[in-house]
Image (tube, rainbow, N blue to C red):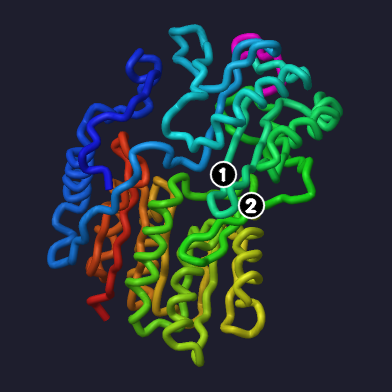
Amino acid sequence: MCAGITMIDCPYYQRNQCRSCQWLEIPYQQQLAQKEKHLSDCLQGLERNAYRYPPSPSAPRAFRNKAKMVIGGTVERPLLGILLSQEEGQQVRDLTACPLYPPAFRHCFPVLKDFIARAGLTPYNIERRKGELKYILLTESRYRQEIMLRFVLRSETKLALIRRELPALLQKLPQVKVVSLNIQPQHAAILEGEKEIFLTEQQVLEERFNRIPLFIRPQGFFQTNPEVAQALYATASQWVEALPIRHLWDLFCGVGGFGLHCAEALNRRQPKQPVRLTGIEISPSAIFSAALSTRRLGLDKGNGEVSFQSLDAAAFALDRNEAPPELVIVNPPRRGIGKPLAQFLNRMPARFILYSSCNASSMGQDLSELSAYRIQKIQLFDMFPHTAHYEVLTLLERHQA
């Protein structure tokens, strides 16, 4: 797809103004090779006899569906970008021309700057602890070319002014379908607070990966690289489709991408024996989206037993006394599933584990604990090109009784 890419044209990198893409000068095939080497080092022989697929590459630019913009400058001339280091005076570097963002975002940024001035949204100053607007968060659904816009503010002081100016904003940016305010009053490095105030009737964006409807909502995790995420979910469903599975758990399920893809593939193969799927995720917002997908797919109407619950994944699993599923899907945060859950899975006789990870180091530690299982298949997905980060998918099969 992009083997010949040596460096994308990024003015911020060339001027040494942003180094978020630390590998930008490394040829893309070399980036993939270095990530493959890192993955092998993390597994330390655990992948012996496993089938390793070639890495799934990414587009080199415009692959992100999200932008998290720190707000700086003044209310009359706001800056949207990243916070510089403390040595540089806590200034904000404007990054609205970042080549990783989709073209739709570039059209939004000038309009949003004008909106900030009209609504009097003074940028929050960390040193002085004054101001209101901390971040602007954008997310795009490529299925409908729609955008979710979130303002992260210190308080609700400007709510009336935002409501007054919002109709003009939506007229200029008709692709913006979901608008909300997130209230984050703490003087701390926390992106968002618990309180979300919706300013539009619509509260979710529909996205589709491999014909499976998934929903983007504030405070719910969603993959940042939709093309690679679609390949990741498709691979997961292909790997499990032919396996003898009628009951599965999807732990750390997010909006349900893995579980719903696998359930759909298994149901398609054996429609007269619908699967039983239980998805667990700590975020209520993500569970709201997963339940919406369940209804859209008709899985809430007797076509198997599909449920999603807002619980701690490890606590849910460790507290189960029921018959174990044939497949456990885990897609944990960077810290991994942890020793207690890994040891529980060793004792619980599930035949297969599908493990997706954004941190191969913690995954390697978890797989060392999962001594009752062996890796059967493994593939790297380059979710984050031009950086050292990546996603990896493994299929494990139990080899000990």
The residue that disc 1 covers is 140
Q: Residue type at mark 2?
A: Leu
Measuring from the top left, give residue 327's x and y in whole percent. 40, 74
What's the mark number on residue 43? Answer: none
The residue that disc 2 covers is 205
Quadrant of the image containing the C terminus = bottom left
Tell me the residue at 46%/40% (across/down): 64
Q: Is residue 218 magenta?
A: no
- What stretch of residues is rendered in magenta? 125-133
Tell me the residue at 24%/36% (across/down): 5
User: In the depicted view, which residue is nearer to us: 34 or 359?
Assistant: 34
Tell me: residue 195, above or below residue 114: below
**SS category of the residue bearing label 1:** strand
**SS category of the residue bearing label 2:** strand
- Residue 64 lies left or right of residue 48; in this view the side is right
Q: Residue type at mark 1?
A: Glu
**Most frequent secondary structure within the magenta stretch:** loop
